[in-house]
Amino acid sequence: MFRWIESSALATAIRQSSWLYPFIEIIHIVGIVLVAGGALFFDIQLLSAHSKPVIESRYLLKWSKRGLILAIPSGLLLFATNAIALSIDPVFGLKLVLLMLAALNAWLFHIRVYVPAKWTAARYHAIASILLWVSIIACGRLLAY
């Protein structure tokens, strides 16, 4: 399956183009900045807030959602250009696991904790989110080398 993905016309065109791969990579990085940046600023506000309702910081998460619109499709396109090697790369596998954990952490936060009465639980989710996003970014950078 990975060989089929990597040999597809789209993956080949991206790989052979002198400007398309870098353009998609820039889109992916902008998406990650929006996703992780919005989440990190939100998490930092959670960790530093004492009595301010969490709801006041929700606007930051809108930027994270917009970043997903850029990061997911561009990430899939970047993966397609090197699917065989990435499919067996342990760093890529770790990045995928960390992304799933970050999504799970965000989902649990939103269904169980997103109220001011649960500051302690909210702070644990914020710490986990910060650690996960820093690790995801580190894995992404390690894949480039």
Image: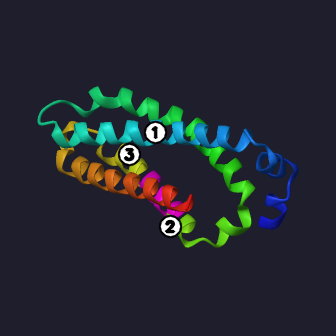
In the image, the segment drawn in magenta is 95-104
Front-most of residues 27 and 106? 27
| Residue with the most extreme right position | 9
Looking at the rendered image, the disc whose residue lies closer to the viewer, 1 or 2, is: 1
Q: Provide the residue designation for mark 2.
A: 94
Q: Provide the residue designation for mark 1.
A: 33
Q: Residue 93: horizontal and vertical position, in percent?
A: 56, 67
Looking at the rendered image, the disc whose residue lies closer to the viewer, 3 or 2, is: 2
Distance CA(mark 3)–CA(mark 1): 25 Å
Q: Residue 111: horizontal and vertical position, in percent?
A: 38, 45
Looking at the rendered image, the disc whose residue lies closer to the viewer, 3 or 1, is: 1
Kind of residue at badge 2: Leu
Compared across the picture, whether 107 is left or right of 2 comes to left
Q: Provide the residue designation for mark 3.
A: 111
Q: Quadrant of residue 57?
A: top left
Prevailing secondary structure class for the magenta stretch in the rendered image: helix
Front-most of residues 102 and 54? 102
